[in-house]
Image: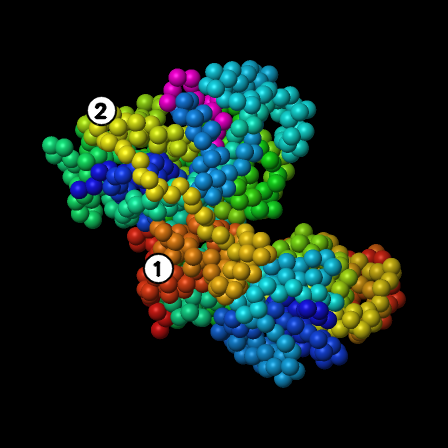
């Protein structure tokens, strides 16, 4: 079958992109979603705190998803559930499969990649010890508890202060489990401050910075973990080990954009974000393949995923309508001096509507700094920040007029002391 | 009363069971764990060795070469993937080159075919990613790779389809001798058998004692491994060994039949036979050792690490003998045990004959196995046919390995099918990919519970006591 826009993934990114593409005049849109319902991981995020930026109110994950699902339904956007995309090629042919249609081959004019991300595992960390039941990622535990209604343990240690881990600390506590502690390798949290307050502090769950799990114990079911303090080199300090009894270890140690399909298609991937390199319209290195949401870089807030995905939806619509301008005059955005990466990193100012919102993460905790964008030595814009941390995504907006003036060259993003 | 009881369902026990299933006798395999291949067979290098390592005249040397030659036909018959990818023993100095020459000569004396010594230049031509420091190598073209647990499962399935009974969660506690039979006392009651085969792996010394055999000891020696994602599977083509030391064949770098890259093992003597824990130091040793042989291994692609325990005999060689009348040991089967298994089985049968077992061939023995066809492995036509027969082939459960619900249901209903999450993983590789079950494990639990008609809370990861869920939410 032939389609104008095919969207891979029906989570918040895919939904927002679909709605926006339709609002920009594209009739023929198909969303492919691997789970049994639209909404993606939001469906298992039953806590609130979603939507403050986009809707000005606090919604739960399913509520937030529902707003977009309703819109998709209202706009009659076609979607297929229970459908797994197996292959994408650079000429934008897609092979997918589901129980109803069997194998589906689609030739798309434009593709929007919105596959989200997956959790880092114990294997990736190479945590030594035995391999019992009771060691799982926080997200897998969240699915068991919130979707399937099963408890995964009674006495819990959480490794990593990523947001899902923090949320699960509270959730497990509310379900009657005892969460002994959260241990974080870094000297700062990788999750949002508000989650530390609302999920740990409010329940007297200790958060140990500069600590890690050095050994997993137990033959069949987890019996405990050995934790240790780590030095500045993040290596365990001998003599600081102690045993903590628990039957469950939840891992919340980072998320990795899921780009196996993107790689197969030949999309250029940024080494730092592990996501596609994208331009101002969220277009990847392949014409007509767009990407948005956590598949591009891992976000803290779904609101920003939505914003970015609308951009991708608009970009894809323009592409179909042949309104997306191509030019050799491009601006390259780069991180520098404390800024690890910037998204988007290629700007064609002709295609910018009002402004570009540059998203970035810093490489450490800094206090009292300017976050600034520069062209050479000239400051384009800067904002003062009391504190920046790798756990909280930063952003900086630059107006279309400014970008048009720069037209080509490089913009670098830095942290500077006040 | 049965004719033969085989203790242990690892690679040795299952190979023996398959061999016995060709004859008109009643055979039962008892296994203390929950599944086939849960001991040393589960976690080892998966190498089919050429046979230049073992000292000439030993059982290891003889059975290795013999076993290696049997692999092609065996794996074809069993529909198990086997690749003769070749082995390289690389030397870093002229000193080590001398050792390589010794291995070459020993290989020739052991009867190993297609052996050659190559220089650094030839080596780099075959393996561009080999260390700059390597000066030459022994190249054994008959070296191969196989999945040890897949092979054991296949052997067991053949045995089962030809009438061998299997009983899991059945631990042998004592063996009593009667006039012309044995009473094998197990955790699930007594089993009477005329002949006993000891293929108990790490615990073979204990079974030998129960059988009244001459004392030997199995010294558990663990080996730690790192497994890398399939993105790294083509980093080397051959299995890369270093020159062996007194502790063993050293750390290897090898592709696996599934296309991953495997690093390991080290060799550490341990006190507990079931200590399958990994350590910081051990994994570090493995990584450093691998990096010594091969350049640019991308460690960001490590997807898991694990430990296997070798059943090392204190005699230095395989112990294949009769400990007492009516009994046969197949003990101390450490490396090259996987390679030797088919030959070990033949030798065990000879010993059983010597003990008086009469073996008359079955006329209807069916040697052919068709492996569980995973949807992903089918061609377009087969896929469409499979989807017509069962819609559930269209539902992908394991995203990394593209394992469908139809595949999982098949694995559950096959003879000796999967009953645990790890059982599904072993048979299909669901949960073995880069996300390590993060997404599919909850769904595998759900499918197992539905098909086995139990509550999800009853589903185990691997063995008794390894429950994944602890109850319902409030």
Instruction: Characterize the local packing of mark 2: few (<14), some (14-19) or many (20 or more) Cα atoms within 10 angstroms.
Output: few
Residue A190: which numbered mark, if any?
Answer: none
Pointer 2: what residue? B214
Q: Residue at 77%, 62% (x, y): give it.
A: A287
Q: Quadrant of residue B17?
A: top left
SS state under label 1: loop
Which quarter shows the C terminus of chain A? bottom right
SS state under label 2: loop
Q: Chain of mark 2?
A: B
Which tag, 2 or 1, sits closer to the chain's start?
2
Can residue A136 be seen by looking at this rendering?
yes
Q: How is the image coloured?
A: rainbow
> Which of B57 and A329 lies nearest the eye of the viewer?
B57
Which quarter shows the N terminus of chain A? bottom right
> Which of B268 and A214 lies nearest the eye of the viewer?
B268
Pointer 1: what residue? B459
The answer to whether residue B246 is left or right of residue A111 is left
CA distance for labels 2 and 1: 42 Å
> Which of A411 and B163 lies nearest the eye of the viewer?
B163
Q: Residue at 33%, 40% (x, y): give it.
A: B363
Where is residue A132 shown, x and y percent of the image?
A: 38, 51
The outermost residue toward the front is: B363
């Amino acid at each position: 079958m032939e389609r104008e826009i095919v969207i891979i993934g029906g989570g918040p990114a895919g939904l927002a992109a679909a709605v926006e593409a339709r609002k920009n005049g594209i009739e023929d849109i198909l969303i492919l979603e691997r789970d049994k319902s639209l909404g993606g991981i939001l469906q298992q995020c039953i806590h609130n705190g979603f939507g403050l930026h986009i809707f000005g109110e606090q919604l739960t994950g399913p509520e937030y998803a529902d707003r977009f699902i309703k819109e998709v339904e209202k706009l009659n956007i076609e979607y297929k559930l229970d459908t797994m995309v197996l292959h994408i090629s650079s000429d934008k042919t897609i092979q997918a499969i589901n129980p109803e249609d069997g194998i589906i081959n689609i030739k798309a004019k434009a593709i929007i990649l919105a596959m989200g991300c997956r959790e880092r595992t114990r294997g990736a960390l190479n945590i030594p010890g035995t391999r019992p039941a009771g060691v799982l990622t926080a997200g897998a535990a969240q699915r068991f508890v919130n979707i399937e209604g099963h408890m995964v343990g009674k006495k819990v240690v959480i490794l990593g202060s990523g947001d899902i881990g923090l949320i699960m600390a509270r959730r497990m506590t509310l379900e009657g489990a005892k969460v002994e502690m959260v241990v974080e390798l870094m000297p700062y949290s990788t999750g949002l401050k508000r989650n530390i307050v609302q999920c740990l502090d409010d329940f007297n769950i200790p958060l140990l910075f500069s600590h890690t799990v050095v050994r997993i114990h137990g033959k069949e079911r987890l019996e405990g973990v050995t934790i240790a303090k780590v030095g500045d080199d993040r290596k365990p300090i001998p003599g600081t080990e102690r045993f903590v009894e628990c039957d469950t270890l939840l891992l919340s140690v980072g998320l990795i954009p899921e780009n196996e399909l993107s790689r197969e298609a030949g999309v250029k991937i940024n080494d730092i974000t592990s996501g596609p390199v994208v331009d101002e319209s969220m277009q990847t290195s392949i014409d007509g393949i767009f990407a948005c949401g956590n598949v591009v870089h891992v976000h803290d807030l779904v609101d920003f995923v939505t914003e970015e995905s609308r951009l991708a939806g608009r970009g894809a619509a323009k592409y179909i309508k042949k309104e997306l301008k191509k030019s050799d005059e491009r601006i390259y955005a780069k991180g520098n001096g404390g800024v690890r990466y910037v998204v988007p990193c290629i700007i064609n100012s002709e295609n910018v509507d009002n402004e570009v919102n540059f998203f970035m993460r810093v490489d450490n905790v800094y206090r009292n700094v300017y976050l600034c964008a520069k062209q050479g030595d000239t400051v384009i814009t800067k904002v003062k920040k009391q504190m920046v941390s790798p756990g909280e995504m930063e952003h900086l907006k630059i107006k279309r007029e400014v970008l048009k003036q720069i037209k080509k060259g490089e913009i670098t993003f830095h942290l500077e002391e006040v | 009363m049965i004719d033969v009881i085989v203790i242990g369902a690892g690679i040795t026990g299952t190979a023996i069971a398959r061999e016995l299933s060709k004859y008109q006798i009643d055979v039962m395999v008892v296994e203390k764990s929950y599944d086939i291949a849960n001991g040393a067979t589960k976690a080892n290098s998966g190498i089919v060795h050429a046979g230049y390592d073992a000292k000439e005249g030993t059982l290891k040397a003889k059975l290795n070469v013999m076993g290696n030659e049997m692999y092609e036909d065996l794996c074809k018959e069993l529909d198990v993937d086997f690749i003769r990818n070749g082995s390289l023993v690389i030397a870093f100095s002229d000193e080590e080159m001398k050792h390589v020459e010794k291995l070459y000569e020993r290989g020739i004396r052991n009867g190993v075919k297609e052996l050659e010594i190559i220089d650094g230049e030839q080596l780099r031509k075959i393996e561009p990613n080999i260390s700059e420091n390597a000066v030459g190598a022994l190249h054994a073209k008959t070296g191969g790779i196989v999945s040890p647990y897949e092979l054991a499962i296949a052997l067991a399935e053949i045995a089962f389809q030809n009438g061998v009974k299997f009983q899991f969660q059945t631990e042998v506690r004592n063996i009593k001798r009667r006039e012309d039979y044995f009473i094998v006392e197990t955790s699930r009651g007594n089993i009477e058998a005329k002949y006993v085969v000891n293929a108990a792996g790490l615990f073979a010394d204990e079974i030998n004692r129960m059988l009244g055999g001459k004392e030997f000891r199995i010294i558990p020696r663990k080996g730690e491994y790192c497994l890398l994602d399939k993105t790294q599977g083509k980093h080397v083509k051959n299995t890369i060994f270093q020159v062996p030391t007194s502790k063993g064949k050293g750390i290897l770098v090898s592709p696996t039949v599934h296309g991953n890259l495997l690093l390991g093992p080290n060799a550490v003597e341990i006190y507990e036979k079931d200590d399958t824990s990994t350590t910081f130091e051990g994994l570090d040793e493995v990584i450093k050792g691998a990096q010594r042989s091969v350049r640019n291994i991308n460690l960001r692609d490590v997807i898991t690490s694990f430990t296997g325990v070798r059943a090392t005999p204190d005699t230095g060689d395989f112990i294949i003998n009769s400990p007492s009348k009516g009994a046969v040991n197949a003990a101390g089967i450490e490396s090259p045990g996987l390679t030797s298994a088919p030959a070990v089985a033949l030798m065990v049968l000879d010993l059983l004959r010597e003990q008086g077992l009469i073996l008359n061939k079955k006329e209807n023995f069916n040697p052919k196995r068709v492996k569980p066809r995973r949807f992903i492995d089918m061609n377009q036509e087969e896929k469409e046919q499979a989807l017509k027969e069962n819609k559930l082939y269209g539902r992908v459960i394991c995203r990394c390995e593209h394992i469908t619900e139809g595949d999982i249901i098949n694995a559950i209903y096959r003879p000796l099918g999967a009953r645990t999450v790890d059982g599904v993983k072993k048979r299909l590789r669901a949960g073995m990919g880069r996300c390590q079950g993060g997404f599919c494990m909850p769904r595998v639990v759900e499918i197992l519970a539905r098909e086995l008609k139990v509550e999800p809370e009853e589903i185990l990861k691997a063995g008794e006591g390894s429950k994944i869920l602890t109850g319902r939410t409030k």
